[in-house]
Each structure stands twice: as C-alpha cells, then as structure tokens.
Amino acid sequence: MNRGVLLVNLGSPASTAVKDVRRYLNEFLMDARVIDSPWPLRRLIVGMILLTRPKQSAEAYHQIWTAEGSPLIVTSHRLQAKLQERATLPIALAMRYQKPSITDAILGLAEQKVDEVLLIPLFPHYAMSSYETAVERVKEVAARLAPHMLIKVQPPYGDSPEYITALTASAANHLEAGYDHLLFSFHGVPERQLRKTDPTRRHCLAVPNCCEGINPAHATCYRAQCLKTVAAFVRQAGVPAGKFSVSFQSRLGSDPWLKPYTDFELAELPKRGVRNLLVICPAFVSDCLETLEEIGIRGRETFLSAGGKEFTRIPCLNEHPSWIAALEKMIERF
C-alpha cells in the first residue's frame, strides 16, 4: 500500500469581495450538516441570510485579511509545508468548502499512486457541522474519483495527550504573564445537533450531568469532548479552580445553541471582578474569522466596554512546533 495524509480544514472565501463571500456562505450554509433542515426550508433560510450577511461578513473578513490572503488558508498551507518537511508520506491539504478543494486533493494523491489515506480533520472535536461533514465529504469524493483508495480517519483528539501538550505549550507564555480569568470559547452548535449525533438518542442533554463519566454517546458528543479538553488543559497547565470558565460562540439563528454564549460572558465577566482576561479558542487549530474578528476585535470591544481593563486572545495552534509534533505522532500511528 502507498500511503498518504490528507488534512482538511473548513475553508474561506476566495477574497473579501461580497460576491466571493456570498458564494462561500451559500456552499457552507447549504450543507445539510450545517443547517440541518429539509432542503426546501434550508434553501429558504439560506436565501434570507444571503440578502444581508455577505456584505456584513465581507466587512469582517476585510479587517483580518492579509496581503497573502485568508489567514485560515495561508496558515493551513504553511502547516502543510512544515509537516511535509518532517514527513516521508505525501501531505495533501483541502478545505471542506471552496479551495483548495477535496476533489483536487484526492486526485492529486491518486496521481501519486496513493491508495491508503490518513484523513486528519483539523477539528479536534466531533460535530456534525465540522468534523462529520469533512469526513463524509472526503469519503464521498474518494468513492467517486478513486474507489480503490482506502480512507482511514483520525478519531477526534480534543483530549489526546499530544493535542493537550500542544495547546498548553502554545498558551504557556500568556498564562505565565498573569491573568484574572481564562475563558475557553468553543464554537457553538445547535442543541438539536447534539441530540442527532447521540447514538443512544436518550443521553445528550436528556439526563443530568450528561457530559460527566463515561457513556457511548460521548464518542460523538461535541459538548462532552469540549469539556474534556478543558479538564485536561487546566490539569496539565495548572490553572486554579475558579479562574476559568467555558462558553460557546458564533451562534446563528434563533434556535437554542450550547450555552453560555461567549458574547454574553464577555459582557458579564467584568461585573464579577475580572479585569485581566485571557481567551483561548480550542475548537480552532488555525486562526480565522471566528478567532481574529469575532473574539479578537468584537469580543475585545465587548469586554473593555463592560469595564474590563486587559484582554488577551491566545492565538490558535497555527504552525506551533508542538502542534506539528502532535500531527507527526498521529501519522506515526497510521
């Protein structure tokens, strides 16, 4: 077997032009695992969103765009290149939406005679709108374009020793500088999606303290996996009890999403005496719109306007050497 590796991240508009942002949002939001409504209703919902959201999002992207392009795409390419320098297997990169495409990545690996692929979703936690959709799309494209290709999937790794080591290493300098409070802000998901991915159909958000202990539902439970990341991080980094909390960002629509909401927490923390705040976003391995603009710009403004004094966003893993080492270990086990 000739083996290769495929890294898959979320994706980004091709530019900050409204038309490119609209194209990206349409592809992203029309994914049935993102807005999990029947197609006619989903088309109606997305159509309404696309009336105003592309212009707003284009303005937000403009604030974080670099001379090289989208921060997410640029960082992902750099990560791929640095990992390739240290790996003997071919390393391909794709985005779930837009470019570089999964189709091109699969064809490129096939041209190199690769017939066994380790798929590493660049999403540490299982969620149908990120990890699951990336995995299923890769399998679908491979079955169509390279049916001989065997796809092996890296399981969610949000509490794996190598990921936690990388995360704590990336945050070490910020923690050592001192802080009043550390906020873990994860990307949010609708509560209904947790119920849909619960194989038991009777555990997630249905029983008290559903994320505690051990349960088969946790293998696909986003919230449980996020909380395990937090528990492992604070244990390894030595964060004192009472100096950290968890919230969820980026909600869309009026349906209930995982709580507490990050924007609400940022407004409330100064009222609890928090003046010097650190924010880390462990659901994202690469800095992107949600970390750079939503947290780094709007979140900062919310916290400072509410009476906070110092706001520090801990960068994502990006190209941190410990993150590259963690990916190397995943490949070594392949």
Image: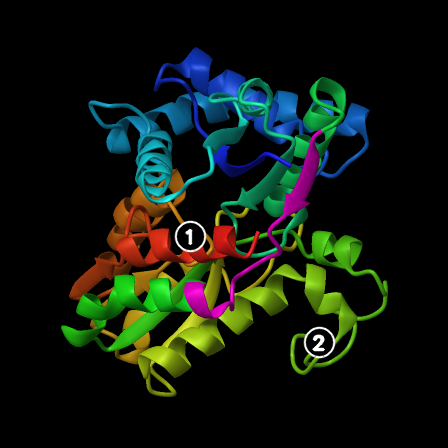
Q: Which residue is mark 1?
A: 328
Residue contact between numbered discs 1 and 2, judged by CB atoms under 8 Å: no
Q: Which residues are magenta?
A: 149-162
Residue 318, percent from left and from top: 32, 47
Residue 4, percent from left and from top: 54, 36
* Residue 210, label in figure: 2
Label 2 is placed on what type of residue? Cys
Label 1 is placed on what type of residue? Glu
In the picture, measured across the screen, residue 266 lies left or right of residue 46, that is left
| SS for dot 1 | helix
Q: Is residue 69 above or below residue 217?
A: above
Residue 133, percent from left and from top: 66, 39
Is residue 60 or residue 304 the one in the foreground?
A: 60
| SS for dot 2 | loop
Q: Is residue 236 magenta?
A: no
In the picture, measured across the screen, residue 298 lies left or right of residue 10, that is left
State the image quarter where residue 219 is shown.
Answer: bottom right
Q: CA distance from mark 1 to mark 2?
A: 33 Å
- For residue 261, say whether it is visible: yes
What color scheme is it? rainbow
Is residue 242 or residue 317 the one in the foreground?
A: 317
* Residue 250, label in figure: none
Residue 286, percent from left and from top: 37, 45
